[in-house]
Image (cartoon, rainbow, N blue to C red):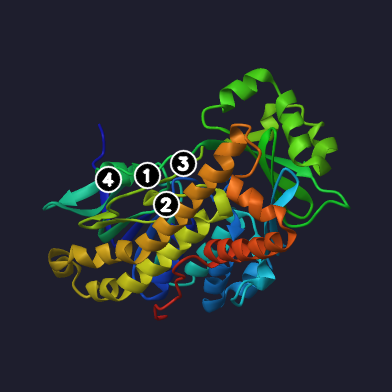
Amino acid sequence: MTRPPTSSTTTCAIVGGGPAGIMLGLLLARAGVHVTVLEKHGDFLRDFRGDTVHPSTLTLLDELGLLREFDALPHRDVEQIGIEVSGQRLVGVRLADIPGPHKRVALVPQWDFLNLLAEHAARYPTFRLLLRSPAYGLVRENGAVRGVRYRDADGEHELRAVLTVAADGRRSVLREAAGLVPIDLGAPMDVLWLRLPRVAGDPHGLVGRIGERGMSVGIDRGDYWQVAYLVRKGGHTELRRRGLAPLREGLAELLPFLADRAAALDSWDQVAFLEVGLDRLPRWSVPGLLCVGDAAHTMSPIGGVGINLAVQDAVAAANLLADPLYRAQADPERFTRTFNPALVERVQRRRELPTRGTQLVQRVIQRQLIERALDGRVALPPAAARLLSDGAWSRVAGRVLGATLGRTMMYGLRPEHVRTPERR
């Protein structure tokens, strides 16, 4: 005989223990809001998750008083980013030239970053994190979402909430349950991720190169390189069928300083596959439910912005909703009946411009650089080639382009700041 679901309540139920979910949970709990975060896994330990922490996120950690603890985590600071096309430097970004207090990208394992946020959130009595608790549906009442259904080792449960937040990623269960369908903006590539040893004499920072065999990016992780090798969308199966030789040869051409280590690749078990997507929801919310992070907008890996935009969403949502949710706790039933959906819609209005703008930059890069590289058209577009052929203009253009892209990708088009109070 199946046991009926047990029921509990919270003010805000967040599904997904990624950067958006944990940051939002921390900020709401810090503001005195009762919040429960549901995470389907037993920990945060998943390899090849986005772990480029940009200056925008470092600024937020500083505002929360967590930067010193963050810097104590094992990490690697990147202070320059370069992209070359057929040996010509197209973009060179020195983060020291970008305005702002933090002039680095911190490469830190995402599980360490999330553990730091979760441990800090747990200091607040209104925060609860439930691991191994996958959500599978929504609680609905009078045409609105009133919570979430989830499973754990003890069975099925209902968690009723004033507001439910879908922060459960690009394949969001809650988004689908709410009937929200994203617009697919298209991505021409998928990515193969692998690790190769780093040795003395290797370059520093982030190195991206386009050549006859496509495009690859090496990310300096200190004692190893995290390497992204781009393949045409849907081409992963064919590449595996041909064996490792084409991959080894492509890496040797694109990142020649890694040629000896690429030659040592002997198993596809050393290579992880990332299916790239680029999309966004026309509408981020329905009454009682808000989508943030990848659940609202999947980003391409270009610029490593995904984690940072997700965190920005969380901060904006907390700034706009923490006080109303805190007041709701005095009489949650009355507040739920009178809760104005327009309040939640303000989050999308706040974050839609930076989302669209960043995705526009990514689409231009996809079209003008990545698609050409994957098609074997290594030459730059004519206008760019003419510009780079003049040494003086090349330096100026590279500096301007680098500063523009760097500012856009590193701090975002509308940086958020922590505005929520701390209530103990």
Residue tagged 4: 180
- In this rendering, position of residue 58 left or right of residue 85: left
Q: Earlier in the sequence, mark 4 or mark 2?
A: 2
Mark 2: which amino acid? Gly
Mark 2 in CB contact with mark 3 (< 8 angstroms)? no
Tell me if I can see residue 368 in this picture.
yes
Task: Measure the alpha-carbon separation of dots 3 and 1.
Answer: 14 Å
Tell me residue 165's x, y (percent): 33, 56
Residue at image x 77%, y 48%? 224
Q: Earlier in the sequence, mark 3 or mark 4?
A: 4
Mark 1 in CB contact with mark 2 (< 8 angstroms)? yes
Residue tagged 2: 16
Q: Nearer the viewer, mark 4 or mark 2?
A: 4
Residue tagged 1: 172
Residue at image x 73%, y 57%? 205
Tell me residue 184's x, y (percent): 37, 41
- In this rendering, position of residue 119 left or right of residue 1: right
Task: Measure the alpha-carbon separation of dots 3 and 4.
Answer: 17 Å
* On-image quarter of the C terminus: bottom left
